Image (cartoon, rainbow, N blue to C red):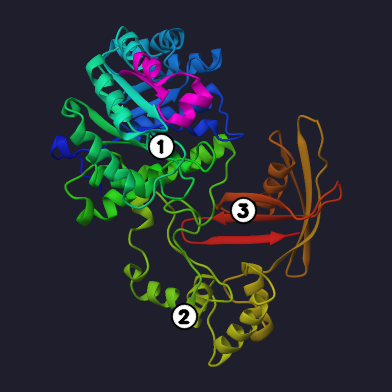
Amino acid sequence: MTRKSGSEKDRVFLFDTTLRDGEQSPRATMTFTEKLMVARLLAGMGIDIIEAGFPAASDGDFDAVHRIAASVRGSVICGLTTAKVDHIERCGLAIRPAAKRGQGRIHTFISTSPVHMKWKLQMSPEEVLRSVTSSILCARRFTDNVEWSAEDATRTEFDFLCRCVELAIKAGATTINLPDTVGYMVQGEYGALFRMVREAVSNSDKVTFSAHCHDDLGRAVSNSLDAVVIGGARQIECTINGIGERAGNAALEEIVASLNTRSDVFKPLWCKVDPKKLGPASRLVSRVTGLQVPRNKAIVGRSAFAHEAGIHQDGMLKNKQTYEIMTPKSVGMPKSAIVLGKHSGRHGLEHVLGELGYVFENGELDVIYARLMKLADKKKHLFDDDIVSTVEAVVGKSAKSRNRIRLVSLKVPAGTMKRHKATVVLEFSGRRKKVVGESEAGPIDAALKAVQCAVPHRARLVEFHVDKLSGGTNALAEVSVELRNKTRTVTASAV
């Protein structure tokens, strides 16, 4: 459980930049409506600061930040800006509705590393120092809540970085961000950088330090937590599903789950994010961006609570704590799953078959297990139909709890018509039934409605996934579907 209260000095503020840095992922652009949905969800789950966009980037980004600042309550609404005066003013206008109620922030940045100053900015160190001061003074005209970032801080000369931070604090910055812009830091380095800067800068106690890590070396989450534990930072910048530039950012769900699950290590640190909303947040962002969450993604991947190995399945069936350090429910994910494959054991198979309603005579389970493992060696996934057909080949009859249904034919015209019609012929124990389904949503929905008409059920379609297997206009595709009701999950696929 997330601790909702504690010492303010031990509170870790979570700064979500899904709508800004996350949207910079290739092909992850969101419409305003989608951004607003995500922003409301973020505020509802307890995110402290929402970076809603880069107002100077486009009129659309300005409008999105402005409208989110006007309508979303409960979180500080932040806009990102360069050190240019016109960009800062644009950002100030965008966040004004939130600033008026004391919940607006301007986040301004400038590069400080030698390689960035020379090749990107084409500015001298002294010019950068002057820009640090002037940019913050400009931002303070619009809000007292100003965050300053030293872009590429982790490749910046230490003495120069300290000079920049000291000037930023003197100019009125309230949060200092030292981003690992290119994911360069390894074990212990990032936390040590924060500690050294805080010790070297005389006025560092007047501000909150923030971590912003990219995942180029796969260390974004670990480095962010090091910044808090070792370096004394009290803000972490992150995104849902870890999306962002290049390899992405620190993943919000992993940060929150780490703080909660390993409270023995991170105590007395705490945050106010509701972990039960991590799963829904992940699914929403995946849907609106079109970026699929890897099945093995920590916390929110579909396989995060799935078990295939026989030893794991046996342990799970005896006590779930043997292989799960948190419950799926605690992070808003579906229940644990026992998945059959070539690594599965007899206990796992018996459990799955029991859920499908099968009861066996002596010795039948061993024969079924041997046949399924032989089949699993030939194909990657064992679906319910594979299991059923193997069981019936061994037992010689259908289980009492199941009626076998076979698809005879499916006809679904697809095109630009407003209403689609699907004709399905199903065979029930040798008897055929023809049904028709119609939908304005498309041919797939029409086909599913036809099947539901023939076989009424309360299951919902959890996933419909199409993977192209070859190239060209005559490409083969594998289609996978997953249906779920309160007690069972059924999956199937075909090419």
**Residue at left offset 34%, top offset 8%:** 138
Q: Earlier in the sequence, mark 2 or mark 1?
A: 1
Left or right relative to 156: residue 173? left
- Gap in angstroms between the C-alphas marked 2 and 3: 32 Å
Q: Which mark is residue 347?
A: 2
- Gap in angstroms between the C-alphas marked 2 and 1: 53 Å
Which is closer to the viewer, label 1 or label 3? 1
Q: In the picture, residue 406 is in which quadrant? A: bottom right
* Residue 338 appearing in the image: yes
Residue 426 drawn above or below residue 402: above
Residue 455 drawn above or below residue 205: below
Task: Give the residue at mark 1.
Answer: 155
Q: Which residues are magenta?
A: 104-131
Left or right relative to 468: residue 8? left
Q: Earlier in the sequence, mark 2 or mark 3?
A: 2
Q: In the picture, residue 203 is in which quadrant? A: top left
Q: Which mark is residue 456?
A: 3
* Residue 275 appearing in the image: no
Give amino acid for label 1.
Answer: Arg
Q: In the picture, residue 431 is in which quadrant? A: bottom right
Labels 2 & 1 near each other (Cβ < 8 A): no
Image coordinates of residue 32 in percent, x first then y, are 53, 22
Give amino acid for label 3.
Answer: Pro
Crowd tier of the residue under label 2, counting other residues whose Cα lies within 10 Å: few below 14, some 14–19, many 20 or above: some
Image coordinates of residue 21 in percent, x first then y, are 48, 31
